[in-house]
Amino acid sequence: MDTTASGKNGTWRNWGGNVSARPAREVTPASVEELAAAVREAAEDGLTVKAVGTGHSFTSIAATDGVLIRPQLLTGIRNIDREAGTVTVEAGTPLKRLNMALAREGLSLTNMGDIMEQTVSGATSTGTHGTGRESGSIAAQIKGLELVTADGSVLTCSEKENPEVFAAARIGLGALGIVTAITFAVEPLFLLTAREEPMPFDRVLADFDELWAENEHFEFYWFPHTGSTNTKRNNRSAGPERPVGQLTGWFEDEFLSNGVFQAAQLIGRAAPAAIPGIARLSSKALSARTYTDIPYKVFTSPRRVRFVEMEYAVPREALVETLRELKAMVERSGLRISFPVEVRTAPADDITLSTASDRDSAYIAVHMFRGTPYQAYFTAAERIFTAHEGRPHWGKVHTRDSEYLAGVYPRFREFTALRDRLDPERRFQNDYLRRVLG
């Protein structure tokens, strides 16, 4: 799969195809020194600077008409400290490469998102997360950061060193500097048993607190126009390994989840009236399965069907009510929604602009197939999410501005004050940051 956001005649595009930009120039630094020099040169030329990973954000968070930094040469593991239980990795390293390299070393991250195509810095800077009762987002597992700031100097931070920068820069939105290396907490490789099982929507909502409390990682997908969900529970296991068989894996993960799903999306885009029928079939096509494997093979899966996504974090106790309102809205609206709604959770963390900052959170993600009009659905969903003090995922479609965000993030001003200090001339500014940070 080609995950890089591609450029034609100097135009950069994101993975979802809904954002494009024309940078004045592109730089692919081979070292931190080269990156720092590129930032200083941009300042001399009066240009803004943005680093871009694989373009998996649906917002224009990485778009720039200034200098576009591509970090693909800043990859690989710098250091593994088994005693401290940490790994330091270059910012441009794809999560996939990190996960595979760690597994070879008998190590693993504690928790991860559901895909691993992004770079480590792109994923953490936007607050990418999976689902977990006790374990938080990828950024919540960061122990130290190195970043090039607006004046071209290299700053390192951790709980002990520059702690006020550390509090904010783990999810820095690219506003505080360009991350060049990340130190993650890791642990000895472990096994997870995944149990995937269809369950009626009403039962999942009725038993949600129990399902959340009884499982280390619980998530589910609801198929709009149906009363059906597919649930997934991941829990640590003593083994033995029982991976999904190659043929079964290909059939369920490639053929059904990508091939047939893509075909169904194309039919739905051409004939929206067919969508409820397709949804009922899709929700019945999935059967229960249980398998045991190393973490990245359980947490992540290939996503080849391109889409556009909006995701909000609501307080965990508001999840059931929010979902009931979303379902009622879809039924009332006459909208035809061909993509399942994804629901996950995260514990409260101490990162300034984390969607789970200081509150236990539940995530609701709505998707539309790439190329289908998503505005009406996303606008109606966003109205419901914001009524529950929802916080939008920084890398996914939303229309919120700094005024709204300052109201749902208790430490919002702390972040903007730090930005004033680290980037007074707004070297890392773009239209998106102007909107969300003011």
Image (cartoon, rainbow, N blue to C red):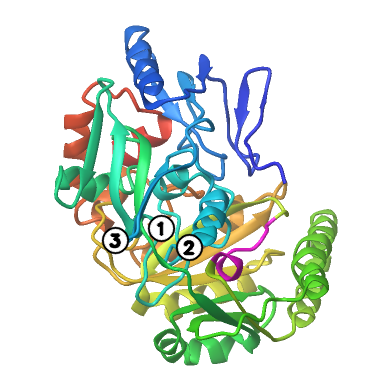
N-term-proximal mark, 1 vs 3: 3
Q: Is residue 120 left or right of residue 83?
A: right
What span is in magenta?
296-303
**Which amino acid type is marked by label 1?**
Ile
Q: Is residue 254 left or right of residue 5?
A: right
Q: Residues within 10 Å of mark 1 (few under 14, many from 20)?
A: many
**Which amino acid type is marked by label 2?**
Met
Q: Residue at 41% across / 30% down in the picture?
A: 431
Which mark is in front, 2 or 3? 3
Residue extending furthest toward the top: 45
The residue tagged with tag 2: helix, strand or loop? loop
Residue under circle 1?
A: 138
Seen in the picture, residue 286 relative to 13 is either above or below; the reply is: below
**Where is residue 272 shown, x and y percent of the image?**
79, 61
**Which amino acid type is marked by label 3?**
Glu
Q: CA distance from mark 1 to mark 3?
A: 21 Å
**Where is residue 134 shown, x and y percent of the image?**
34, 75
N-term-proximal mark, 2 vs 3: 3
N-term-proximal mark, 2 vs 1: 2
Q: Residues within 10 Å of mark 2 (few under 14, many from 20)?
A: many
Q: Quadrant of the C terminus?
A: top left
Q: Is residue 354 visible to us here?
A: no
Residue under circle 2?
A: 112
The residue tagged with tag 1: helix, strand or loop? loop
Q: Which residue is at the front of the view, 233 or 33?
A: 33
Q: Residue at 49% across / 23% down in the picture?
A: 68
**Where is residue 240 shown, x and y percent of the image?**
60, 85
Residue under circle 3?
A: 83
- How many marks overall? 3
Q: Are marks 2 and 1 in contact (CB under 8 Å)?
A: yes
